[in-house]
Image (tube, rainbow, N blue to C red):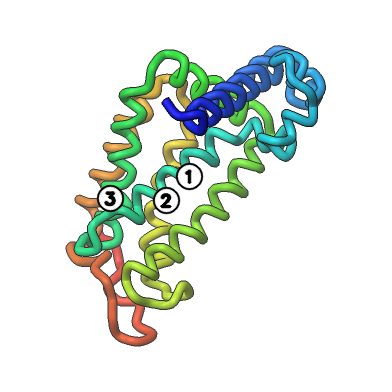
């Protein structure tokens, strides 16, 4: 293994250790009561080292959410251009759910702790919603690129809004059963595909037209 590879692995271990320490402290002492100095001390690093990885307490608390969004966007970018918009989004999510099912105990436990923390801490829940909205704008931009339209095209916005709405439905019933979360997501994706009019998410090329976007039961 190269020196660069070893350094990257060490950096990842330090980052994971900071996340684990932060989640444990937030859950045991409370988010507001926990300081960055305490998190750093738990990992036996300096606060300066903490700030090399995270900008704030909120940043470390929501880091797994941000990581998942980056992974999802990368998966979406890699989808075949022949796929229709909602199909590309759905298949990207199914790929993410496959990764979720293969997590080891430590990784799954980290996600469960983060979910519990966010759903029991109002400032973090608000922060998670901000991340979701920011990511929604990025998804719209990527969808518009795939479709060859402007980012303000209503068709791109509509397809992404439906998809994000499915994710919010999953968030409405938080669970620490990751397999159950994956099944719920899959059920909702299937429901959307079955309930919406065939062709509703096909690319629209005509200027200014939003295309067929109505839903029927």
Residue named by callout 1: 69
Query: Dividing the image into 4 quarters, which one contains the C terminus?
Result: bottom left
**Pick the front one: 169 or 206:** 206
In the figure, 70 relative to 77: above or below? above
- Residue 164: x, y in percent? 43, 51
Contact check, label 2 and label 1, Cβ < 8 Å = yes
- Residue 132: x, y in percent? 54, 48
Q: Residue at x 35, y 87 (%)?
A: 207
Judged left or right of residue 207, residue 24 is right
**Pick the front one: 13 or 143:** 13
Residue named by callout 2: 73
Residue named by callout 3: 192
Q: Hey, which quadrant is residue 202 in on the image? A: bottom left
- Residue 184: x, y in percent? 33, 33
- Which mark, residue 34? none
Q: How many marks?
A: 3
Q: Residue at x 62, y 49 (%)?
A: 130
Circle 3 or circle 2, nearest the eye? 2
Q: CA distance from mark 2 to mark 1?
A: 6 Å
Circle 1 crowding by C-alpha within 10 Å: few under 14, some 14–19, many from 20: some
Circle 3 crowding by C-alpha within 10 Å: few under 14, some 14–19, many from 20: some
Query: Dividing the image into 4 quarters, which one contains the N terminus?
Result: top left
In the figure, 95 relative to 175: above or below? below
Contact check, label 1 and label 3, Cβ < 8 Å = no
Q: Is residue 115 visible?
A: no
Judged left or right of residue 175, residue 25 is right
- The disc, 1 or 3, on the residue closer to the chain's N-terminal end is 1
Q: Residue furthest front?
A: 2
- Residue 43: x, y in percent? 69, 15
Q: CA distance from mark 1 to mark 3?
A: 21 Å
Q: Secondary structure at mark 3?
A: helix
Q: Residue furthest bottom?
A: 207
């Amino acid at each position: 293994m190269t020196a660069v590879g070893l350094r990257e692995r060490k950096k990842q271990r330090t980052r994971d250790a900071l996340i684990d320490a932060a989640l444990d402290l937030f859950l045991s002492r409370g988010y507001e009561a926990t300081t960055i100095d305490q998190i750093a001390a738990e990992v036996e690093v300096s606060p300066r080292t903490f700030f090399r990885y995270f900008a704030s307490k909120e940043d470390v608390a929501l880091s797994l959410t941000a990581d998942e969004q980056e992974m999802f966007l990368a998966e979406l970018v890699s989808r075949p251009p022949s796929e229709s918009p909602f199909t590309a989004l759905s298949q990207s999510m199914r790929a993410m759910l496959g990764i979720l099912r293969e997590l080891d105990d430590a990784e799954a436990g980290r996600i469960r702790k983060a979910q519990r923390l966010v759903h029991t801490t109002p400032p973090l829940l608000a922060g998670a919603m901000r991340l979701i909205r920011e990511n929604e704008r990025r998804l719209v931009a990527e969808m518009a690129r795939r479709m060859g339209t402007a980012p303000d095209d209503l068709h791109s916005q509509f397809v992404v809004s439906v998809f994000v709405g499915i994710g919010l439905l999953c968030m409405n019933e938080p669970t620490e059963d990751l397999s159950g979360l994956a099944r719920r997501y899959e059920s909702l994706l299937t429901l959307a595909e079955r309930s919406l009019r065939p062709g509703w998410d096909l690319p629209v090329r005509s200027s200014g037209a939003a295309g067929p976007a109505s839903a029927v039961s």
